[in-house]
Amino acid sequence: MRVIWTPQAELDRLDIFQYIINDNQAAALRMDELFSHAGERLGRIPQMGRAGVIEGTREYVVHRNYRLVYEIAGDEIWILALVHTARQWPPKDPA
């Protein structure tokens, strides 16, 4: 299956990378590689994540601190967000 990172998920990934690189460049590179490999695994085994909090999504814990939120649409996997496990998910409406 084809794996597509949405702009929001790409931004989440970049934010995580930039945060970690301030303390440890090697760790930032390893974490980003972990995210990359997780996307590749989902491309081969899309159902490996659990049912997501948001209906129609799935969540794959790729590290004790991070999970990928994704949805399966036909022969594509859309990675919607990369969320730190300590963060509120889904985010509360600002209204």
Image (spheres, rainbow, N blue to C red):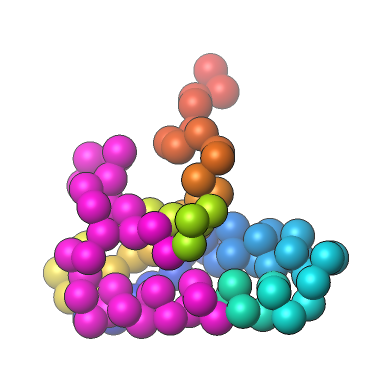
Q: Relative to residue 68, is residue 24 drawn left or right?
A: right
Q: Nearer the viewer, residue 13 or 64?
A: 64
Query: Magenta region: which residues?
Result: 33-62
Q: Could you tell me which residue is drawn at 45 percent across and 37 percent down?
A: 89
Q: Could you tell me which residue is drawn at 36 percent across and 82 percent down?
A: 40
Residue 25, image quadrant = bottom right
Q: Residue furthest top?
A: 95
On whether residue 61 falls in the magenta region, the answer is: yes
- How many numbered discs, if any? 0
Visible residue check, residue 11: no
Spot occupied by residue 54 in the image (x, y as percentages of width and height) = 29, 39
Residue 3, image quadrant = bottom left
On whether residue 19 falls in the magenta region, the answer is: no
Q: Relative to residue 1, is residue 13 drawn left or right?
A: right
Q: Could you tell me which residue is drawn at 39 percent across and 75 percent down?
A: 39
Visible residue check, residue 66: yes
Q: Residue furthest front?
A: 64
Give the answer, above or below, for where 91 lies relative to 66. above
Q: Residue furthest right?
A: 22
Give the answer, above or below, for where 86 lies relative to 26. above
